[in-house]
Amino acid sequence: MSTIESVVQETRVFPPSEETVKKATISGMAAYEALCKEAEQDYAGYWARLAREHVTWKTPFTKSLDESEAPFYKWFPDGTLNVSYNCLDRQVEAGKGDKVALIFEADDGKVTKVTYKDLLARTAKFANALRAQGIKKGDRVLIYLAMSVEGVVAMQACARIGAIHSVVFGGFSAKSLEERILDAGAVAVITADEQCRGGKNIPLKPAVDEALNLAVGHNVKTVFVVKRTGGACNMVAGRDVWYHDIVAGQSETCEPEWVDAEHPLFLLYTSGSTGKPKGVQHSSGGYLLHAILTNKWTFDLKDDDVFWCTADIGWVTGHTYITYGPLACGATEIVFESVPTYPDAGRFWKMIQDHKVSVFYTAPTAIRSLIKANEGNPATHPRNYDLKSLRILGSVGEPINPEAWMWYYNNVGGGRCPILDTFWQTETGGHMITPLPGVTPLVPGSCTLPFPGIQATIVDETGHELEWGKGGFLVVKKPWPSMIRTIWGDADRFKKSYFPADFQGKLYLAGDGAMRDAKTGYFTIMGRIDDVLNVSGHRMGTMEIESALVANPLVAEAAVVGRPDDLTGEAICAFVVLKQSRPSDEDAKKIAKELRDWVGKEIGPIAKPKDIRFGENLPKTRSGKIMRRLLRALAKGEEITQDVSTLENPHILDQLKQNA
Ligand code: PRX
């Protein structure tokens, strides 16, 4: 049975426990409905009330929303603030200076605790160092760092001086880095000599050097290098500086740059349906508000909680649920350098036990791989660890299949902890559709109901709302503060991608198919409706991978589709036509490996196709259009029962069934 079928047929319901309802900030369905109603009656007023209550403003705003240039919405436009001030100074000023902000656990298990006072001092020193290098408000700074205290400090320091950061996941290649450096017009890069993962030291700096060599006409003046391992590291005179040298002697205080609420806090590149990744631009005020609210309401963060989001700062989850949200709520959180299976598959459970983690947020892929590892190895099974500190569990990034949900619920949460299946996107800044722990009866595999104030619904291709029980396009009817502001340098693409004319330019199009349960109205996400794949919760554009493949001198043509995969959710399947004749057996295997490595270099290892199939041609209509629905069926291993009468070359279907 497919995930979607098993979710739609799911009948188990888990109502919140009395204890959870009692403790929760949003307590009970009536409280939830009251918030939704308030937002429906006056959405601008609703968010403005919350922005006054939860964000500290330097200059309070007088106008909540400017819609005059919709869909380029401006939230709290005449207010000024500083995001780093909201995360750090205000905790210290509230007497939390000695509270632990970050518990950093390194690959080798070494633990470093950083208090709010200390984090503020480190941020101030690095912010001063950035300023000393001439970096100022509005400049773009690219961050290519692994999970580290310095990663959080670097982002906070940029925010402090009003520089716009763009974090690039450490798994992306030099080529991907080059594209982002150029597109963002970055003036500086912050990186490390190496990163440590799973007992191995993996160089980071060489990719920056290569990217800067490739990036003709780039504006990068300074490369800041964190010494993580002390391994060999090429330093370019006049350009590269050691992080520890540059912060030494800097003052531990740094006056924040007070910026307008709409000032861009960061760009984060993500895949879309065309070849080029898009720089999603987020604001300062609106983004921060949603980061705070979702941490307080979805995760119910309280002063005594220890929060752990296992994402990487290279993804949006690491921005909202590591660098900004938990700190702006004054929480204690874990920053984890390593991988869930090192030194063994009990690492997560051991860390939850050691640090008494109470709120734990991870991805279905991690759960699925740990089920596999732990069910085969009883020694690292969660039952061997004391996980009683947990009270709330979260899931993000891809649909969670009911089987994985139940395992997570029973084995990690001990049947006590609600699982919050949070649906959202890089573009939305924070949770959009999610259960709230003290409110929502849970149904495995459903992300349930919209976050209060998010007016999500499902429409047909003309933008008309569908009745419950029917599948269609997931849209948001009203603007919300943490929404994407634009695509960096491409306002037109922003409008076309998210506010298409088919919907009169008024509805935010998420790019996912969804349906609502006919009785409860609960949402189930049915997957992307565009050419975007979700592999292990990582978003990949099929056209991006196709462009990488055809850039290889051996390749004449390529088409990429996704197919379901038990572990990674979706797997990448590439259909390739070579310039030479179709290879077979060993030859095919050799070329397939070469092409995988090529894609790894062009984009990053996460984009390597799992399946590669060679054909003399691709299935095309007589007018030359690639028939992707056939490719999807072939990738799944389905018998072709579809109409192939328009196909010009039916014999190649047999060739494309074979995996190299
Ligand atoms: O398809 C949806 C899926 O991930 C996409 C967004 O990917 P990205 O921008 O990389 O952000 C991931 C982290 C927020 C969505 O369009 N997705 C995300 N969360 C869920 C999900 N699909 C189903 N259930 C979820 N909880």
Image: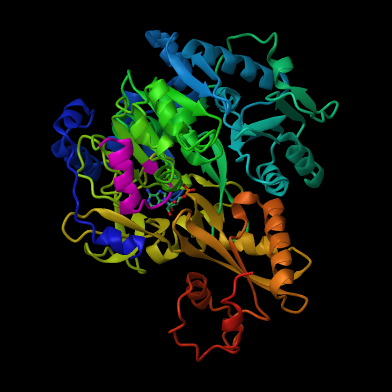
- Of 301 and 362, the residue lying toward us: 362
Q: Position of residue 619 (x, y in %)?
A: 58, 81
Residue 286 visible in this rendered orientation of the protein: yes
Residue 67 visible in this rendered orientation of the protein: no
**Residue at 50 percent of width and 27 percent of height:** 335
Q: Position of residue 541 (x, y in %)?
A: 56, 58
**Residue at 78 percent of width and 76 percent of height:** 580
**Residue at 64 percent of width and 64 percent of height:** 546
- Residue 575 in the image: above or below residue 382: below
- Residue 547 in the image: above or below residue 227: below
Q: Position of residue 58 (x, y in %)?
A: 44, 19
Indicate yes or no whether the magenta region holds residue 170: no
- Of 629 and 293, the residue lying toward us: 629
The image quarter in which residue 326 lies: top left
- Residue 95 in the image: above or below residue 615: above
Colour mapping used in the image = rainbow
| Residue, far right | 237
**Residue at 37 percent of width and 39 percent of height:** 65
- Residue 6 in the image: above or below residue 222: below
**The N terminus - image quarter:** bottom left
The span picked out in magenta is 395-414
**The C terminus - image quarter:** bottom right
Left or right of residue 602, residue 441 in this image = left
The image quarter in which residue 233 lies: top right
Left or right of residue 587, residue 99 in this image = left
Indicate yes or no whether the magenta region holds residue 404: yes
Q: Position of residue 488 (x, y in %)?
A: 59, 46
Number of callouts in the render?
Answer: 0
Left or right of residue 158, residue 319 in this image = left
